[in-house]
Each structure stands twice: as C-alpha cells, then as structure tokens.
C-alpha cells in the first residue's frame, strides 16, 4: 500500500517553496518602509498600486521555482546532462533578488539597489537562456519574471535618479 507521504514530490515542493518562502521573508522587511518611507519618495507614474506586488511576486516565485525543478529533474533523468551551471545561475539570480529588498526598503540604498537589479536582470536573462537549452518550458517560465524585473528595474532606476537628495536617509 502506498502512503500519502510517498506520493509527495519533495524536490518539486522544495524547488517551489524556496523562492516563495524567501520572497515572503524578504517581504516582511518592506512592511514599515512601505507604510512610512515609500509614500514620501518620488515614484514614476507607471508604478503599480502596492497591492499588486504580493500576488505578482508570489506567482513569479512559484513559476521560477517550477522552472528550476524542471532543470533539476532533467539532470536526474539524463545523468549525462550537466545542469550545474544553469542551476548555479539560478541560485545567483535568487540571491540577487533577495538582496534587492533590504537594499531598497531596508537601508534605502537606492544606488546599490539599482546596481543589484541591473545585475539581477542580466542574470535572469542568462538563466532563462540556459534553462531554455535544457527544457523549453523551463525557459518560458522565466520570461514573465524577466519582464517583471525589467519593469521593476525601470521603477528602481527612476526612484534612485529622482530621490538622490534623500538617498540612504531613513524617514
């Protein structure tokens, strides 16, 4: 008899869970700043309402996690396939993603957050390309994430450029 636990795909849960949990954790950093600091800075007209960020990021984190699972699975199913490089790129972009929140919302280092998001976007593009070489769906699952980070990057760069007088100040 098969137990319910044996039916759970642990690698899939871990792959999706890691970015979702990291994203939710870093989101806790933003709460005070979103309420107290973020409303006081100059933002572009294309900035979405605050309520949009939670659902969008949760969806993107789940999508990128599933993409990483597909790459992991491809490496398990085809041992001759080296997925180390693409998964290292994925881990790098995830680290850059997690770093952006404390830079921007935590310590209000807008220049550093801008550099981070530019590096993040480049790493996402590289990850997307490498994932797509291994699994077409995994590559496509990264595209909305790349698009959103490009959009978020435009907001970050605008905020940095238009708030240089308040850079690094905690309100």
Image: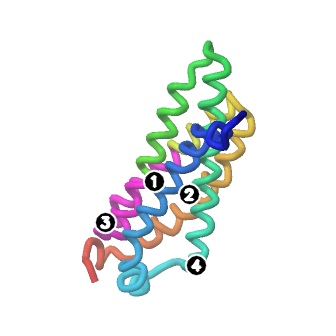
According to the picture, the residue beneath numbered tag 1 turns out to be 97
Question: Label 4: few (<14), some or many (≥20) within 10 Å?
Answer: few
Q: Which mark is residue 149?
A: 2
Q: CA distance from mark 2 to mark 4?
A: 17 Å
According to the picture, the residue beneath numbered tag 4 turns out to be 51
Q: Secondary structure at mark 1?
A: helix
Question: Label 3: few (<14), some or many (≥20) within 10 Å?
Answer: some
The residue positioned 59% from the left and 31% from the top of the image is: 72
Query: Closest to the observer: 113 or 34?
Result: 34
Answer with mark 1 or mark 2, whichever residue precedes in sequence: 1
**Disc 1 and disc 3 in contact, CB within 8 angstroms:** no
Between marks 1 and 2 in the image, the one whose residue lies nearer the viewer? 1
Place of residue 109 in the rendered image (x, y in percent of width and height, measured from the top left):
31, 66
Query: Closest to the observer: 60 or 41?
Result: 60
Q: Which mark is residue 109?
A: 3
Place of residue 7 in the rendered image (x, y in percent of width and height, measured from the top left):
68, 39
């Amino acid at each position: 008899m098969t137990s319910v636990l044996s039916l759970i795909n642990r690698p899939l849960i871990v792959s999706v869970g890691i970015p979702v949990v990291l994203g939710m954790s870093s989101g806790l950093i933003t709460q005070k700043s979103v309420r107290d600091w973020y409303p006081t800075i100059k933002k572009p007209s294309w900035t979405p309402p605050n309520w949009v960020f939670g659902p969008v990021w949760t969806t993107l984190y789940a999508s990128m996690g599933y993409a990483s699972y597909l790459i992991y699975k491809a490496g398990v199913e085809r041992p001759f396939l080296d997925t180390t490089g693409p998964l290292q790129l994925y881990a790098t972009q995830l680290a850059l993603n997690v770093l952006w929140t404390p830079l921007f919302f935590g310590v209000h280092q807008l220049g550093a957050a801008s550099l981070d998001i530019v590096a993040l976007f480049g790493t996402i593009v590289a990850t997307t390309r490498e994932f797509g070489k291994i699994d077409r769906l995994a590559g496509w699952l990264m595209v909305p994430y790349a698009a959103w980070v490009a959009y978020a990057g435009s907001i970050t760069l605008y905020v940095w450029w238009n708030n240089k007088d308040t850079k690094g100040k905690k309100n």
